[in-house]
Amino acid sequence: MHGDDRHDDPPDELNTVSVPEPFRDIFLRAQRYVQEYFSDLTRDPGHGSITIAGDRYILVRAASMSVEFFEMVASLYRDKGTDVARSVANNLLFDVAHAIGKADANVFRARMGVTDPVERLSAGPVHFAYAGWANVLIHPESRPQPNEEFFLLYDHPYSFEADAWLKRAVRVEFPVCVMNSGYSSGWCEDSFGLPLVAAEVECRAMGDDHCRFVMAPPSRIEQRIADYLAQAQLADRSPRWLGDEKPIEVPEFFQRKRMEDALRASHGALEQRVAERTRDLTRANDELAAEMAERQRVAEERTYLEAQLRETQKLETLGVLAGGIAHDFNNLLVGILGNAGLALEDLPAGSPARDCVSDIETSALRAADLVRQLLAYAGKGRLAVERVDLSALVREMLQLLGSSIRKKAELRFEPAASGPIVAGDAVQLRQVAMNLITNASDAMADMPGVIRVSTGIEHYFTDDAGSYRGAALDPGEYAFVSVSDTGSGMDAYTRERMFEPFFTTKFAGRGLGLAAVLGIVRSHGGALRVTSKVGTGTTVRVLLPLALSQVEDAAQVAESSARAEAASIKVLVADDESTAREVAKRVLEGMGLTVVIAVDGEEAVRRFTERHAEFRLVILDLTMPKMSGLEAIDAMRAIEPNIAALLMSGYTDEESDALSRRHGFSGFVRKPYRPSELAERVREALQAAGLSMRAAGNTIE
């Protein structure tokens, strides 16, 4: 085209756009199509319409969309200065042109029936020329490709915006071809299917030789501009931007809205004026609704993550609190549990007081369980292995949770005829049962149905491995507990995420959920399987190794309470709690040992220093005033390196065990303890020191 409506250019001459040779055929085909498209042009002033190939077009004076538009905006924002006015005008024009470019590209892509991104792009520069915006010259170093490496370096000879400013003989200090940037980046964005933005790096209105643009994804545009300016400087060219303190301004979506919000807050009168002049842009803003919705989604996700962070902080705080109270609370339980155990040993079998003392011991054990549950919830517990009757444990939890089960749900318990007996931590296994039962109840909601809980022994086959999660199991017999419900069931998405920490389908989460259950089962050497289907319910089946030994606890109690006739063996006990000291003294004297008491670490070191040759064993509390148990044992070892020692503490985390081993203790006694537990640890320490006990004769040799 040469400024008239002639469409008789030679069909093989590409004269509307300049592109690298590899793209010539693609753009030539696009030129033929657009030329044919624009040849079907009709003007009907009587109806105020211009039609091209069936589409209605409009003519707009170039100056009104460029220099005159800037002047109008400058008058509106006069009190804010030229930079603010230019920024508002730039972003308004860019947003509108970007949207128009995307829309035009979408229409031409459908008309031409092309799918290749470069072919989609090809009609853009030709349409640009025919529509009177500018010619296009694409530089060979461009890389038009549908990924983050997209890069386009191109010129717009005869830009209508630059010509409008030059016609006014107005010399500016900023690029003016904003709509050119917006339209071309919008067209390319639709063609390549990725976000793109363009910025003018040289402008004839500024005195440069070209109107030159750089286009790239938003994440790469600044680096691409910097690379171009660096190469220009190396080539000894002088774009106006070189040496300028102001950086090249990259159009930014939504900057207009942020500026309007700030202006409304500080200038009430200006708010009304801006609102009146932006009302006509409401339709254009509708196209931005999708991005606004995405921002809302991100904000909601951030809120959710912040809530999770607060929950984690609560757990950390609970851990600190649990650790702080465990020592003092367990010291109290030492007195209750220890004295109850000693009293039971002294009371005759028919004494009416035995039942009362036994109830005291049971309550103290339950209180100790509560402390361990608190520490386990806070992440400070450790596995306390004992023989557990799985059916009895589940029955106990069903009785405890009976009032909280959904009223319309029928609860059916089908226990094994006896047992099964497993070796595990009863507290943690109760947590497994509680979680599975409450989950089944929640799944029932207000629907009538059945919750079936069963226990027993089953054979695990190698073929079952694919359906179970947890520890790797060998084929053989395992104890099982199964919890089934006829509730809503789980969809595929929920089944995929059900073992993630803190994932929940409930209105309010209750902690680690199935993640904690899986962790406890795995730590016990077991595995679990979940089968669920939407509308039919869920079944969780847990397998646990059977206990190997059938030795009764009573035999261990009898052995640990056996007396020793070795009064010549002296034991030094240091604890800052008087009750704890007295209980330890009674237990040790009941074993036939001679006991010396110290009220803190400093007194213990003093007594040991005076009579170290007489002591065969020292028992030290971990935390004591003046001098801790660790400091005390270090001081004693300086005098007697081989002295046997036990460490006592109310803390139940693994750190206590590590500390006892690190400082050479023979063992660790966790508070609160039964008399038999302390006696067993003492017996082991004395045996390790070269002394042995014969329970049958109640002696220490």
Image (tube, helix red, strand yellow):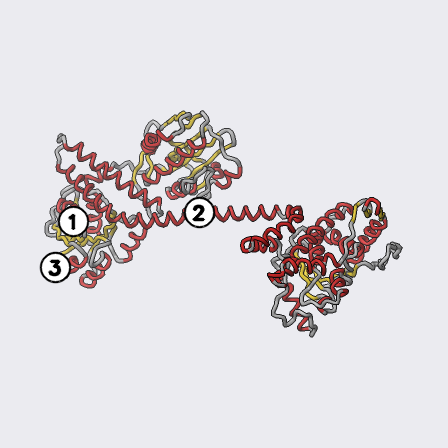
457 on left or right of 157: left
Residue type at numbered disc 2: Gln
Report crowding for label 3: few under 14, some 14 to 19, many 20 or more residues within 10 A (C-alpha).
Answer: few
- Give the labeled residue for mark 3: 611
Q: Position of residue 228 (x, y in %)?
A: 66, 67
To which quarter of the image does residue 92 belong?
A: bottom right
Q: What quarter of the picture does the N terminus occupy? A: bottom right
Residue type at numbered disc 1: Ser
Q: Looking at the picture, does residue 287 appear above or below residue 137?
A: above
Report crowding for label 1: few under 14, some 14 to 19, many 20 or more residues within 10 A (C-alpha).
Answer: some
Residue occupying the point 67% across, 48% down: 280
Q: What element carries label 2?
A: helix
Which mark is in front, 3 or 1?
A: 1
Residue type at numbered disc 3: Arg
Asked whether 466 or 575 is in front, the reply is 575
First in sequence: mark 2 vs mark 3: 2
To which quarter of the image does residue 164 belong?
A: bottom right
Give me the disc on residue 86: none
Asked whether 223 or 494 is in front, the reply is 223
Q: What element carries label 1?
A: helix
- Give the labeled residue for mark 1: 578
Residue occupying the point 70% across, 62% down: 176
- Give the labeled residue for mark 2: 308
51 on left or right of 421: right
Q: What element carries label 3?
A: helix
Q: Residue furthest bottom?
A: 236
* Residue 654 appears anywhere in the view: yes
First in sequence: mark 1 vs mark 2: 2
Q: Do the residues labelled 1 and 2 touch (CB within 8 Å)?
A: no
Q: Looking at the picture, does residue 330 appear above or below residue 196?
A: above
State the separation of the CA atoms marked 3 and 1.
23 Å
